[in-house]
Amino acid sequence: MKAPRVTLEQWRTLQAVVDHGGFAQAAEAIHRSQSSVSYTVARMQEQLGVPLLRIEGRKAVLTEAGEVLLRRSRQLLLQAKQLEDLASNMEQGWEAEVRLVVDAAYPTERLLRALAAFMPQSRGCRVRLREEVLSGVEEVLLDGTADLAISSLSIVGYLGHELGEVEFIAVAHPAHALHQMQRQLTLEDLQSQLQVVIRDSGQQRPRDVGWLGAEQRWTVSSLSTAVTFVANGLGFAWLPRHLMQRELEEGRLKPLPLASGMRKRPRFNLYCHKDKPLGPASQILVELIKTFDALPLDAAFAAPAALTAKEPADV
């Protein structure tokens, strides 16, 4: 790759001339001689092959080409500063990236608010978010490709931070045969019908959580697909209320009148990789996830993104 002909310091000098209204004023602002500033700008124009400034009276004014290049140079200098700040933060133990794996059933709205509040505190730290189902979350955490994990399963050898419950409801389309029975439903009633289940994304020990042993079973890879299938009359399923609220309100899904077990409320936990100490950014994100999870879902939606967690004391 060919090296740039113009340095960042040259662009910074041009900005000073424009921002301060002339060579003398720029020289005073950046603590250089006026002749040095003039030479730097002249050399830039020679290297670029286009005029950047023209003199009107005693004032240096940008040419049309100079306006375009100066605008781009401001972005360049800002990115350079951000790069240096990131390097400084990394020296202090600040992570370049936090890897988070989340069970797909966990409410995205809560996570969104936590991440929105994390952004202004992130100091350039990236978040790599991955969605899995059931034991897939555990596998990603255990194989070391995630720093944080949100799961409803108990992970052996880990103590999680307790989060809230997610309500699952047994539902079917109002015209489904189960609703036509017009009575409380039994296990035998359900076993005679098609059940839609979500595929466990884990490879080592996938689980059939929620499957009732029905002979007719369709397995799909996402909760949104399951909602679509059931709302169109294809089987029944236990689905998270927050993912099918619209279908419930519009009457395309209706809770099944089960004698017991119509609702399930698994509790989710936030796990941290036990073999990797949390850095400052991860600690902040953990606190924000816990904060927004503690709010009711509607309140989490309305909570200001400016809500922040305290930075660790050693940062």
Image (spheres, grey):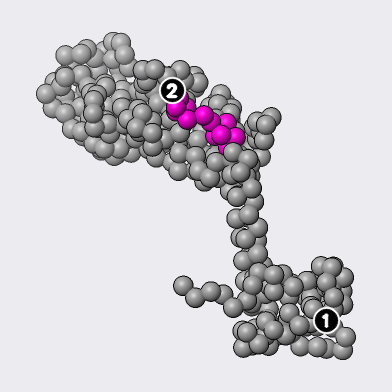
User: Horizontal placement of 138 versus 26: left or right?
Assistant: left
Q: Secondary structure at mark 1?
A: helix
Residue 77 visible, this orientation: yes
**Going by the picture, which residue comes out furthest to the top?**
259
The C terminus lies in quadrant: top right
Reading the image, the residue beneath label 1 is 35
Q: Residue at x 64, y 72 (%)?
A: 7
Residue 175 visible, this orientation: no
Q: Amino acid at mark 1?
A: Ser
State the image coordinates of residue 293 (x, y, percent, origin top left).
53, 27
The foreground one among 299 and 282 is 282
Q: Residues within 10 Å of mark 2 (few under 14, many from 20)?
A: many
Q: Is residue 280 magenta?
A: yes
Q: Residue at x 45, y 25 (%)?
A: 274
The foreground one among 261 and 259 is 261
The foreground one among 221 and 215 is 221
Reading the image, the residue beneath label 2 is 268
Calculate the distance from the C-alpha at mark 1 to the C-alpha at mark 2.
Answer: 66 Å
Q: Amino acid at mark 2?
A: Phe
Give the magenta part as a residue range: 272-283
User: Horizontal placement of 290 versus 85: left or right?
Assistant: left
State the image coordinates of residue 278 (x, y, percent, origin top left).
53, 31
